[in-house]
Amino acid sequence: MPTYSYTAINNKGSKKRGILTAASEREARKFIKDLQLTPINISLSTSKSSFKSKIKNKDIVLMTRQLATLLEAKTSIVDALKITADQLNNKDLMSIILNLREDVVQGKRLGQSMKKYPDVFNNTYSSLVTAGDSSGNLDVIFEKLSDYLEESASIRQKVVSAMTYPIILIGFSIIVVFALLTFVLPQVIGQFVKAGAELPLITELLIGVSNNIFTIAIFIILLVSISIFAYKKYTSNINNHINAHKNFLKLPIIGNFILISEIERFSSTMGLIMESGSNLDIALEESSKVLNNKFLHHIVMNAKKDVVEGKDFIFSLNKTEIFPNIFIQLISSGYKSGNLVKMFYKASDFLKNEIDSKRSVFLSLLEPLVIIFMGGFIMLIVLAILIPIMQMNTLSLG
């Protein structure tokens, strides 16, 4: 379906610009008017930009929760989409919802229509809506989708905060060290040099670093740039990419944190998809798409292949020795008892607690380590200044 760019005026006289998809310019004009805007200009868009950059995850979560609430109250899907669109602040998402409503009015399946917007509704989302539409349980599906998206957003936020804090702390430490070496140390040591004092080794080393700080910084930047380029070149081969991601999971502390976060997201997705009525092989394939780690994705796809061939998929997961024992035990128990959905949810709940626990430990260890590092470096600078002072005092007394 064509994408149109438009410029319009709202009821306050302010200009608004946006993008929408429509079968024709006439239909696009109608959608713009439904947004309570007066179109000024509509043109066929040649831009390859997607809605994704303008529609945030929290917009999708809010929209899903609103639809779940309305459908639970026995509102028809056509009315629920219109009410939801009217309540959204994001104009791009609003135009998409109105497009979806128009498709539903014309007799199309909501889930199938959502597949026109893969940057907004991923395959798991649209497939679950299709399953709910077919079974007549759209209200249940949207309720479970809202819970799933909210929990996923919460876990993502915890992971991001665990990574952001140390980056800020280390970045601030580097700035302080840079300032001390560039501005403070040369000024103080310069006075000793003018006085003809003999500088100790530690002072000369720090002065050497200070005098070449920009050269060292450029060297580090070049080294990082070359490393990034080499990594991208290396991982352009899929097998190398898988091996690189396998090694990431072996990194101290952070590797295990990433592993648990990935498996938790996989577990909750498996529970949700299987609960909607999908077969195990389909659930494995769809759930593998939420995994950012290529090694874990490879393992899950191998497990899916085993299921298709009639083999025990637990063996595929277990033989890698990468999944936590508690996860394997829970899923194995669920597989044998025919209660996989419940066990995937149990595994997800357990791993959420693990993420909280490891995040707390990680942050509690990091702060004192950075303080020790900073304290040690500042101590070196203090010694580099104090030792020449003590030497000069000794000479003057002598």
Image: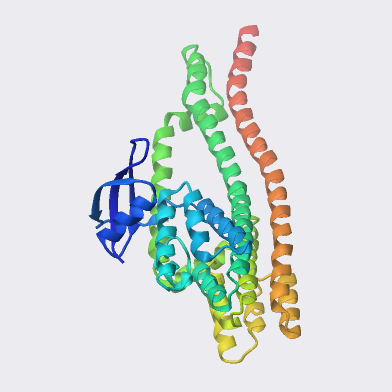
Q: Position of residue 148 (x, y in %)?
A: 62, 62
Q: Position of residue 86 (x, y in %)?
A: 47, 51
Q: Nearer the viewer, residue 185 or 248?
A: 248
> Which coloring applies here?
rainbow
Q: Hey, which residue is sitting farthest bottom in the picture?
A: 310
Q: Which of 323 and 70 is in front in this view?
A: 70
User: Residue 115 falls in which quadrant of the image?
Assistant: bottom left
In the drawing, does residue 296 fall left or right of residue 85?
right
User: Residue 279 falls in which quadrant of the image?
Assistant: bottom right
Classify the position of the C terminus by image quarter.
top right
Q: Position of residue 2 (x, y in %)?
A: 28, 63
Q: In this view, does 388 lie above or below 77?
A: above
Please report the residue visible at 56 percent of the width from the left and 65 percent of the height from the top.
247
Classify the position of the N terminus by image quarter.
bottom left
Q: Where is residue 371 in the image (x, y as percent from the top left)?
A: 66, 35
Q: Which of 159 and 123 is in front in this view?
A: 123
Q: Hey, which residue is sitting farthest top in the picture?
A: 397
On the question of residue 86 being in view, the answer is yes
Q: How many marks?
A: 0
On the question of residue 48 being in view, the answer is no
In the drawing, does residue 248 fall left or right of residue 239?
right
Q: Nearer the viewer, residue 152 or 204?
A: 152
Q: In this view, does 99 lie above or below 327?
A: above
Q: In this view, does 284 lie above or below 4?
A: below
